[in-house]
Amino acid sequence: MKKWSILVLIFAFAISMVGCSSGSESGDLTKVNVGLMPYYDYSPLAFAEEKGFFKAEGIDFKSTMFPVEGNVAPALVQGSIDIGAFSDTPSITLASQFPDLEMVSFHNVFKGFAIVGRKGSKTYDQLIKEGKDGQAAAVELGKQLKGKSIITTSGASFYMVIEQALKNAGLSKKDVKIIDMEPDQGASAFISGTGDFYLGGLPQREKLEQEGYPAIISGDQIGSGAVILAGLASTKKFVSEHPEVIQKMEKVWFKTLDYMQKHPDEAYKFVADWSNKQSGGKSKPADVKKFFTDYITFAHSKAEAQKLFYDPNSPTNWKKRYENLIQYHEESKEIKKGSVKLDQLVPAEKIFSDLK
């Protein structure tokens, strides 16, 4: 009898462990462990959980917060999470270390980086008003950099903005003087009169604009090398075993963005509260609204995603962006030449085309 009792306990324990595994069925729901990061870009996933959209698609959504992609990647490969928030550059720089990693979707374009000029500098918007098309305006502003000094931070995620702006005008870094400083230090130096142009992060851009210095051209106006594409990553194993989960995650994303677009005040308040809870900050709904309006473009629908990421003529086409990134990181020797294979790293377009 004692022997049978032990066997029953072992069997019960085994069943409970299966119920806790990733991608498992729990009643009518499939448990999915998702790694998030505490940034506005990924907040719609938290909002979807709040609204019950995941459950409506049959997903038992469980989230864990990570600071950056460098923490998300090992969690994916080790299996503690199934899907994780991710952006383009880390997916390339971490590819050789985590060969099982895959970018399964793209959801938004961060366009908040901008080259800031001195007061009175010509801007992209002014050139457009004068009748120039986007490409001609980008070229003219790129030429404006020739022979000038630019304060920026080498190795930062926004550094490629300079590379792309110069490339548009047929120039290179040899045609400008780079003043390498940390972002905050650089912004202060620019205000004090150092440098002709400045490129830093979003907080520094906003600080300088408040001081009256114009953003002469922003990332999305420069081209695919000057923006950041963000979405979701997973592993080859999870994608092959649970393709339906990836499909459902995409359906939830579009449903959530459609709802947020129709109920903006509710969405802004939720995101501000969610962000403050993660970071201990003091964001207000107005801050979220400004970010969503000025600095990021979300794919609210399948049609918008197609236009943003998969249309070959889009300035934010994922393949153009990745080719720029790979070239940059190979030339800077951050990755070995030929080590990143796009067809293996990014199945997002194939997954998108299969969406029903």
Image: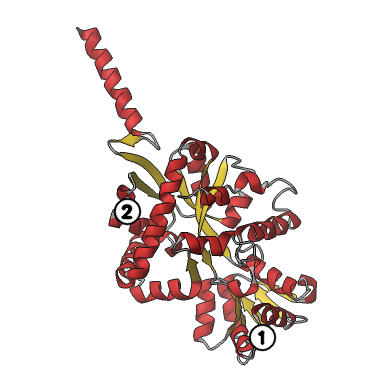
Give the secondary structure at mark 1.
loop
| In the rendered image, the vertical position of residue 275 relative to residue 147, given as above or below | above
Identify the image quadrant of the N terminus.
Answer: top left
Give the secondary structure at mark 2.
helix
Nearer the observer, 313 or 343: 313
Q: Quadrant of residue 330?
A: bottom right
* Residue closest to the far front: 356
Badge 1 vs badge 2, beta-carbon distance below 8 Å: no
- Which residue type does callout 1 highlight? Lys
Q: Which mark is residue 355?
A: none
Residue occupying the point 61% across, 46% down: 345
- Which residue type does callout 2 highlight? Phe
According to the picture, the residue beneath numbered tag 1 turns out to be 132
Residue occupying the point 64% across, 46% down: 343
Nearer the observer, 88 or 307: 307
According to the picture, the residue beneath numbered tag 2 turns out to be 53
N-terminal of the two: label 1 or label 2?
A: 2
Measured from the top left, where is residue 209 in percent x and y? 52, 84
Residue occupying the point 23% across, 10% down: 4
Measured from the top left, where is residue 166 in percent x and y? 73, 73
Gap between marks 1 and 2, in whole Å?
44 Å
| In the rendered image, the vertical position of residue 26 relative to residue 298, given as above or below | above
Marks counted in the figure total 2
| In the rendered image, the vertical position of residue 69 relative to residue 315, given as above or below | above
Q: Quadrant of residue 325?
A: bottom right
Measured from the top left, where is residue 236 in percent x and y? 54, 39
Residue occupying the point 45% across, 75% down: 293
